[in-house]
Image (cartoon, rainbow, N blue to C red):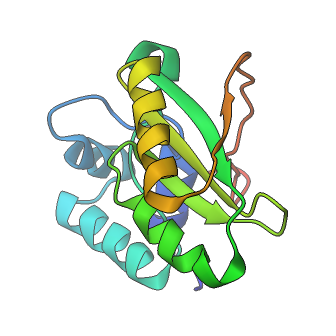
Amino acid sequence: MNLDLLSRQLIDRFQHGMPLCPEPFKEIAKVLGCDEAHVMACLQAMDQAGTLSRIGPVFEHSRAGASTLAAFAVPAERLQQVAERVSQYPEVNHNYAREHFYNLWFVLTGPDRPHIERVLNELEKDTGLIPLDLPMLTAYRINLGFALEEGL
C-alpha cells in the first residue's frame, strides 16, 4: 500500500503517545489539521489494507497485574486447533507460530500470578501439552517505532 500524507502523519506522530482524553481521534484530527471523520476513514483504510495491526495501549504489566510469555511444543497437525483454543482466552494478548521445538508462543496477562497459573493449568488440561512458562524477571524497553519520513 502506498501511504498518503495523512496515513504517514498518523503513524509518525501517534505510534507513541495517543492523546489521553475523552475524544482522542478528534484531538488527533485537530493536531493534523483535518476532521475526525477523515482520521477515522484513514485508519479504517489502513486496517483493511493490512497496514495497521492495532490501535491500543501498551500497559506496564506490573501495574496492570501479572503476565508471562508462554509456549507449547505442538505437533504440526494440531497447531491450528491449539492456536484457536489458546486465542479463546481473553487473557491471551496474541499468539504466533515459530519454527522451533516450541512452535506456538503467546503472551498471557491476568490480575495476579495465581490467575496466570490457573489459565496455564486449564490450557494444559485442554490441550494435553505442557506449557513453557517464562515470567518476566527484568523489563527491557526498546523503541519499536519507526519514522516514515524525515521532518514529519
Residue 117 place in picture, x, y as percent: 48, 29
Closer to us: 12 or 140: 140
Residue under the image location 32 percent in, 46 percent down: 28
Closer to us: 33 or 90: 90
Residue under the image location 64 percent in, 84 percent down: 77
Residue 19 place in picture, x, y as percent: 33, 34
Rendered position, 61 above or below 120? above
Q: Total number of numbered labels?
A: 0
Residue under the image location 70 percent in, 74 percent down: 75
Residue 9 shows in the view? no
Residue 39 shows in the view? yes
52 sits left or right of 137 in the view: left
Residue 55 place in picture, x, y as percent: 39, 52
Residue 72 place in picture, x, y as percent: 66, 55
Residue under the image location 50 percent in, 23 percent down: 61
Q: Residue furthest right?
A: 100
116 sits left or right of 142 in the view: left
Give residue 40's quadrant in the image.
Answer: bottom left
Closer to us: 104 or 44: 104
Closer to us: 122 or 99: 122
Rendered position, 123 above or below 38? above
Q: Quadrant of the N terminus?
A: bottom right
Rendered position, 1 above or below 61? below
